[in-house]
Amino acid sequence: MKGQMNKLISLVIPCYNEQETISLFYAEVEKIKKSLRGHRLEYIFVDDGSNDGTLEILRQLNQQNPAEVHYISFSKNFGKESALYAGLKESQGDYVAVMDVDLQDPPEQLIQMLVGIEDEGYDVVGTRRVDRKGEPIIRSFFARLFYKLINQMSHTQFVNGARDFRLMTRQVVDSILEMSEYNRFSKGLFSWVGFKTKYLEYTNQDRIAGKTSWSFWGLFKYSIEGIINFSEAPLYLASYVGVGSFLVSIVSLIFIILRKLFYGGSVNGWASLVSIVLLIGGIQLFCLGILGRYIGNIYLEVKKRPIYIVKEKK
C-alpha cells in the first residue's frame, strides 16, 4: 500500500455539447477525491467540436485549477472514438479512467476500481449495466441483439452491457495506443488487448442534465462499424449467399429442362421471371454492400488521415 501512494490517476472525459453537465461532473468527482487513497488526479476533457458553451466552461475550469484540469479542443466534431484516443494519448497517469461527463458513470465507483487494481491484482476494472431502465424498448432490443450477434461472429468477446467507463493500468493504455487505426471501436479494442479484467455491475443511471447526442441511427451505424472491425463473418456470409444462389439456379435449370423433355411447354409468367431477376439482383447488391463496407474501411486506413486535429489545448 505504501508503495502505491501518490500515484497519478488520469480521467479522460469526452465532451460534445455538454455545457450543462461539465461543472456538475467536476463537482461530483471532487467530492470523492479524498477517498482515492491519496492518489493525485488530472482531468483531461476532450471537446469534440462542440457548438455550445462547452469550450468556454473548460477554459474557466482550467483557469481555476490549471495544475489538474486540462482540455483538448478539436477543430470540428471527429466523434467519440477520436476523443477517447486523444485523451488516452494525452494522459500521463499511472492509472487512466475513461468516463462520460453526463454522470451516467458514477464517480464513486472509482473507489471500488482502485481496490480491484491495487488489492485484487486486476489490470482493468470496468463497469456493466445490469438493466436498461429508462432506455427506449426498441434501443434495448437492438442492443441485446448486437451483443448476441457480435459474440457469435467475432473471436473477441464483448460483455453485454459493458460501458466505456473503466480504470486501466498504464500498461493497458499503452497497449491500446499501439493500435492507431483510423476506424476505431473502443469496446472491441478494450477487449482485444486482453489483460486481467473485472466488471462492476450497477443499475442504469439517468443523465444529470442535457440531452444525449446519440440517436438510434447513430448507434446503429456504430454497431455496424463494430461488427466490420472485429469480424470477417459478413464476408463469409456474402460468399455463402452467392454459393446458395448458384446452387438454387442449377436446380431450377435442371427442373426446367426435365419438364421440357417429359411434359413439353415452358414455364409461363413474366411476373415470376421478373421477381426472380429482382431477387438475384437484390442478393448481388447485398453482397456488394458488405464488400463495400470493408473496402471503404481499407480506403480510409490507407489514406493515413489524422484521427483528429487539435485547435486548442491547455
Image (tube, rainbow, N blue to C red):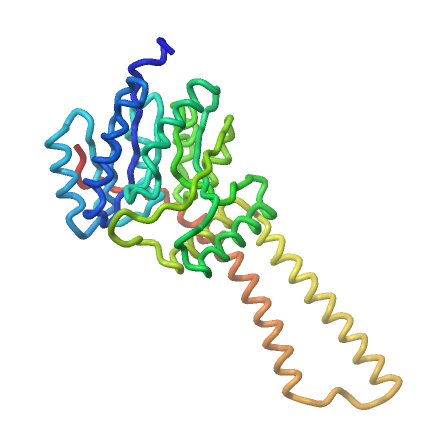
Where is residue 8? Give x, y as percent: 29, 21
Is residue 301 at all visible to an observer of this figure?
A: no
Q: Nearer the viewer, residue 33 or 301?
A: 33
For the C terminus, the image quarter is top left
Say which of 116 and 202 sits in front: 202
Choose between 206 and 308: the one closer to the eye: 206
Quadrant housing the N terminus: top left
Instruction: Give percent across and percent down for residue 302.
Output: 41, 44
Q: Position of residue 40 (x, y in %)?
A: 26, 21
- The x, y position of residue 56, in whole percent, is 13, 43
> Does residue 206 appear in this view?
yes
Q: Residue at x 66, y 83 (%)?
A: 273
- The residue furthest right is 262
Q: Residue at x 13, y 38 (%)?
A: 59
Q: Residue at x 38, y 56 (%)?
A: 218
The residue sitting at the top extreme is 2
Name the residue at 63% across, 87% down: 271
131 over 27 or under it: above or below: below
Image-based side of 16 in relation to 112, left or right: left
Of 308 and 71, the residue lying toward us: 71
Give the quadrant of residue 259.
bottom right
Tally of numbered discs = 0
Where is residue 310, by image quadrant? top left
Along the horizontal axis of the image, is 157 left or right of 88? Answer: right
